[in-house]
């Protein structure tokens, strides 16, 4: 009976999403304001950290847009007084790490408001984050995802759907939602690649979800599948990944999801839109003229209560697009450009200049015969370039393309030293970041 109730609740949430697919921007903003009034009142009464933020800023709840943002490090430092379920970070981390080690993701933590699911972000920026969600939040999240991702919803529910998740961790989001017509399988990407490829082929998913680098590796390992849709998660989806996955599996869409929540979903035309029916976004411009329009999001989740996200600054960089041809009022994301802390800082004509990862990724995509690469800043003027394959041709063309990208970005390419090495095999479960800054200019630290 509980599982049947869960399934009904998920479908109800999924059907309710139709009322939140606004086509008028003013109506969408009025909807957000209505949610904010009730949500902030509840959160301030149950999250001491959030109440203290408003008090220290001298702001009323109605002035929430003026609240100074908090980042992931601040959230984690205040976790015990930020969450509304009486949880201690040490307990959350212990359960989440035990799940990672044992690969058993079923344990939850008891709270006065019911059990909560816990998990960890991958922490690729050196700042891992914990997340906790209640049963109600989990079911609502599942309904939203199904509404936006399941092909031809709701008619798609009339046919048997097999959803495959190729992920580092099973968050348990759909564990109690499966039915005769809707089946889910978690494929642990820490398993050997050939086993994963064989399991994926045997399962024959109608919906395939995973990081693009892993899905490409499965193609290379011989996986055969023809899903109705491929969903890219957890990494930046680059043009070469999209093209390879569409050739090998089928149409590709992108989901923007993080420790901070479900932030972006594909529209019926396949474009990525911000999840503004549930999350309010402000944006901070990053850099100056010619920076490519990069924006850093500051989000307020208008429904999440167990781990409130109020004026939370992300480290991601987004580039927004003009309004989408689908007609939805939610803003369209042209691309998720990566993390701000991966922007390189290199010598330029008048001091140091910022070189955005986008520029280098675009340059490396022009290198013929290059399968994979990483570009890492390891010193004030030193880049480590790792190539697969490393041949005289890829080495020479990579250097030409990198120097061109640096020059276009205003850096002095002559003063930048390039060290070229073969790219080692990727470690299982490690999120791919093709452009990284390991040297920190503010402190002069070496590689981390």
Image: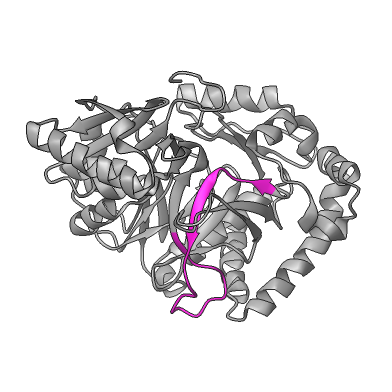
Type of colouring: one colour
Residue 122 x, y percent position in the rendering: 49, 33
Q: Is 325 rendered above or below residue 81?
A: below
Residue 18 x, y percent position in the rendering: 57, 75
Q: Nearer the viewer, residue 198 or 309?
A: 309
Q: Nearer the viewer, residue 57 or 101?
A: 57
| Residue 165 left/right relative to 398 | right
Picture quadrant where residue 355 is located: top left
- Verify whether residue 318 appears in magenta: yes
Q: Residue furthest front?
A: 350
**Residue in the image at 60% along x and 77% along y:** 22
Q: Nearer the viewer, residue 179 or 316?
A: 316
Q: Is 17 rendered above or below residue 188?
A: below
**Residue in the image at 90% along x and 55% along y:** 60
Q: Is 137 rendered above or below residue 428?
A: below
- Verify whether residue 264 appears in magenta: no
On the question of residue 287 being in view, the answer is yes
Q: Nearer the viewer, residue 107 or 395?
A: 395
Q: Residue furthest left?
A: 392
Magenta region: which residues?
312-334
Residue 120 x, y percent position in the rendering: 55, 33
Picture quadrant where residue 268 is located: bottom left
| Residue 117 left/right relative to 36 | left
Q: Is 260 rendered above or below residue 446?
A: below
Picture quadrant where residue 277 is located: bottom right
Residue 83 x, y percent position in the rendering: 76, 38
């Amino acid at each position: 009976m509980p599982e049947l109730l869960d399934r009904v609740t998920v479908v109800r949430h999924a059907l309710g999403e139709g009322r939140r697919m606004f086509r008028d921007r003013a109506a969408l903003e009025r909807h957000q304001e209505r949610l904010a009034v009730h949500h902030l009142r509840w959160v301030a009464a149950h999250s001491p950290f959030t109440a203290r933020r408003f008090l220290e800023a001298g702001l009323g709840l109605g002035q929430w847009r003026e609240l100074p943002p908090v980042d992931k490090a601040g959230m984690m430092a205040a976790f015990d007084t930020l969450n509304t379920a009486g949880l201690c970070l040490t307990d959350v981390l212990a359960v989440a790490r035990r799940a990672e080690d044992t690969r058993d993701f079923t344990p939850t933590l008891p709270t006065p408001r019911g059990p909560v699911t816990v998990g960890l972000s991958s922490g690729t920026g050196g700042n891992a984050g914990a997340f906790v969600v209640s049963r109600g939040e989990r079911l609502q999240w599942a309904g939203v995802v199904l509404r936006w991702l399941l092909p031809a919803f709701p008619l798609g529910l009339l046919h048997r759907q097999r959803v495959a998740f190729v992920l580092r961790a099973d968050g348990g989001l759909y564990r109690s939602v499966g039915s005769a017509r809707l089946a889910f399988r978690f494929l642990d990407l820490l398993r050997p690649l050939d086993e994963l490829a064989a399991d994926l082929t045997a399962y024959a998913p109608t919906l395939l979800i995973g990081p693009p680098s892993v899905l490409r590796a499965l193609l290379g390992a011989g996986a055969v599948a023809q899903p109705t849709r491929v969903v890219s998660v957890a990494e930046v989806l680059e043009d070469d990944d999209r093209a390879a996955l569409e050739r090998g599996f089928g149409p590709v869409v992108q989901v923007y999801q993080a420790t901070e929540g479900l932030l972006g979903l594909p529209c019926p035309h396949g474009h990525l839109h911000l999840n503004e029916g549930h999350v309010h976004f402000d944006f901070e411009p990053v850099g100056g003229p010619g920076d490519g329009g990069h924006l850093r999001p500051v989000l307020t989740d208008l429904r999440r209560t167990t781990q409130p996200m109020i004026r939370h600054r992300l480290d991601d960089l987004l580039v927004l697009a003009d309004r989408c041809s689908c007609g939805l009022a939610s803003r369209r994301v042209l691309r998720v450009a990566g993390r701000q802390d991966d922007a390189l800082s290199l010598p330029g004509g008048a001091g140091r200049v910022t070189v955005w990862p986008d520029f280098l990724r675009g340059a490396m995509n022009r290198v013929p015969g290059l399968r994979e690469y990483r570009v890492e800043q390891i010193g004030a003027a030193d880049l480590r370039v790792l190539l697969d394959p490393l041949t005289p041709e890829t080495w020479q063309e990579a250097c030409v393309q990198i120097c061109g990208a640096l020059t276009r970005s205003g850096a002095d390419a002559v003063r930048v030293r390039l060290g070229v090495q073969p790219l080692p095999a990727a470690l299982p479960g490690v999120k791919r970041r093709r452009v990284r800054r390991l040297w920190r200019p503010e402190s002069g630290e070496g590689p981390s």
